[in-house]
Amino acid sequence: MSWLRALRAITARVAMWPRATGTWLGERFELEDSLMAVLRHPVPRELERPIGWWYVFGSATLAIFVLQVVTGVGLAMTYVPAPNSAYDSLQFISHDATLGSVVRGMHFFGAAAMVVLVLIHMTQVYLFGAFKFPREANWLTGSLLLLATLAMAFTGQLLRWDQDAFWSIVVAAEQAARAPVIGNWLASLVVAGANVGGATLTRFYATHVFLIPAAVFGLIGLHLYLVIKRGISEPPVPGVVIDRPTYRGRYEAMLRRGIPFWPDAAWRDAVIAALAVLAVAILAAIFGAPELGKPPDPTNVIADPRPDWYFLGYFAILALIPPATESIVIVGLPLFAFIFLFLVPLLWPDGERHWSRRPAAIAAVALPLIAYASLTVAGIESPWVPKLEGGGVPVAVTQGLPDAPLRGANLFGSKSCFACHAIAGAGGRRAPDLTHIGSRLNRDQLTSRIATGGGGMPAYAGSLTPSELEDLVAFLLVRR
Amino acid sequence: MTIGLSAGIAAIVGLPILGFLLAPLFRAPPDELVPVGAVNDFPVGETKLVSVRDPSPLAWAGQTADTALWVRRREANGPAMFQVFNVNCTHLGCPVNWQAEAKIFLCPCHGGVFYSDGTVAGGPPPRPLFEREWSVQGDRLLVRQQALPTVKRG
């Protein structure tokens, strides 16, 4: 049976090929000293325990970033960044190109995943006190990466180049213009000229595709370098404080009995990163690319531009704050948030790391989170938006009304009262609900409110005839 | 020496690039008069949406070379004949909608309201609608081109 022995020998040889190839590559490319040395860098032994599951969000963010690069390159192969073609090329990608909807869908859901994962990663680092000495620079580079991620998310939404995107750029320029001294320059740079037009889109495209990604690549390199050089922070223990003179010696002693990142800790990162990518892929496969709005048309004034969900909270702030404080909030709030972010490791580099000994830190996470969540809900509902379309007063309300109130009910619809005021559940929610107004105000009060306005209500004396005004008041008086 | 040489070279290639990128800042804003229609197209007492086209658009600008304006015909003749408004809400630039029956402009973004003469009737806008300079030549109404108006530019 010599052929059997020969076969066995050949299989044995073949089976050795992967290992042999690995050894050859490793030796010739000196991977043992570079890649493997980095991958095997020691991490604290505690990461073997379930607490290690908290240390995975940076890797997951990185995995989604790679997905964004790959899908982004894919989209750039077809997307035409010219104002007269961008919309059509995106419609082609979304509806006609093979798997185009899935690729664009992955880029879309990946963008949201990036924003969410970066924030989760930062929250974990903050609550674990991992930003403290000697890892302050890790936090600073991470903060810049957050800034870059938000900038990518925003510029990406504008590349959709539909009606919403067009007006979003106008709104962005108007906000930039509120900055002191350089406001108008900023606005001119945002739209690349005097108005949103032919020169605008290519700028946003280059920024989204070259400029910010280049910065992100550099920052990720620096961030990872610091992560390896400074070492993964050990899980915090209540009562154990950072003492600068002794910390490094203590940490090195800890690493001497540590575990290698690869493979002992890395598998958790791999699991969560894979789940994150899988989640994005599944969402993309089910929902596909988000439908574009109407084509961008500056002469179509029926537009209701609003950003993707993770920016809705900021959108809501602009509607809810008192107008007088607006310029301060538009410029000051983001500026304050980022300055605060950068100051965190510089102001609190020492002391307790464990979150249970840092109640203020918990509040610093919880309060903005609750505030932003409520603002997001407000942004989704947008009660301040007038109802520009759709009928008038519900039929149930007008049924059996005498002549004058019936004419008033029709005026309520045609004179746009309906846009801001609701009656019996129909109408806008910007202004008070008038379902039972007849029991709160009398004829004189109603007449003067409508005629002279005030408190956000326009004066209608000029656009209603005296008899129309009488009819309208007659209608409101029967609303009890 | 090495540093000086590198800095010199960087400046030589960097300045033109910087100039190219910042060019929009130094370009004079548009201010030609462009026609928006015949005077008779605008009945007295009405407010109509018109669109004007950038007289020298980039070839690939497509629809974005157009700008919309609200034209209000106040009187049959005279210096108060027209009021021409930018469609941009003075709050954050969203396009305002004319409600012909109610005689108000409504903004869809944050609910700003303006009267027919452009003054603020309610909501967050800090100032009246921006107005464009206009003139009548023969039977044509002309309107001056303008940069995107912002609260600062006024």
Image (tube, coloured by chain):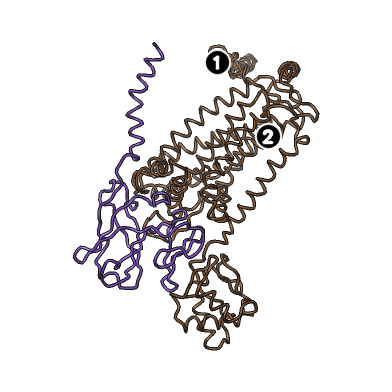
Asked if one can make out residue A80 in the rendered structure from this viewpoint, the answer is no
- Nearer-N-terminus badge (1/2): 1
Letter of the chain that mark 1 sits on in the rendering: A
- In this picture, residue A276 sits left or right of residue B13: right
Q: Above or below — where is B108 with respect to A49?
A: below
- Quadrant containing the C terminus of chain A is bottom right
Letter of the chain that mark 2 sits on in the rendering: A
Residue A93, position as x, y percentages in the image: 43, 46
Q: Residue at x 68, y 34 (%)?
A: A126
Which label lies toward us, 1 or 2? Answer: 2
Residue A426: quadrant of the picture: bottom right
What residue is shown with label 2?
A126
Residue that sits furthest to the left in the current view: B138
Q: Above or below — where is A331 with respect to B126?
A: above
Q: Nearer the viewer, residue A212 or A315?
A: A315
Chain B drawn colour: purple
What residue is shown with label 1?
A25
Residue A78: quadrant of the picture: top left
Q: Secondary structure beneath disc 1? A: helix
Q: Secondary structure beneath disc 2? A: helix
- In this picture, residue A70 sits left or right of residue A243: left
Q: CA distance from mark 1 to mark 2?
A: 40 Å
Residue B37, position as x, y percentages in the image: 26, 64
What is the three-letter code of the residue carrying label 1? Leu
Residue B5: quadrant of the picture: top left
What is the three-letter code of the residue carrying label 2? Tyr
Q: Nearer the viewer, residue B100 or A452?
A: A452
Structural crowding at the residue carrying mark 1, measured as other residues with C-alpha within 10 Å and reported as few (<14), some (14–19) or many (≥20): few
Q: Residue at x 52, y 80 (%)?
A: A472
Chain A drawn colour: brown
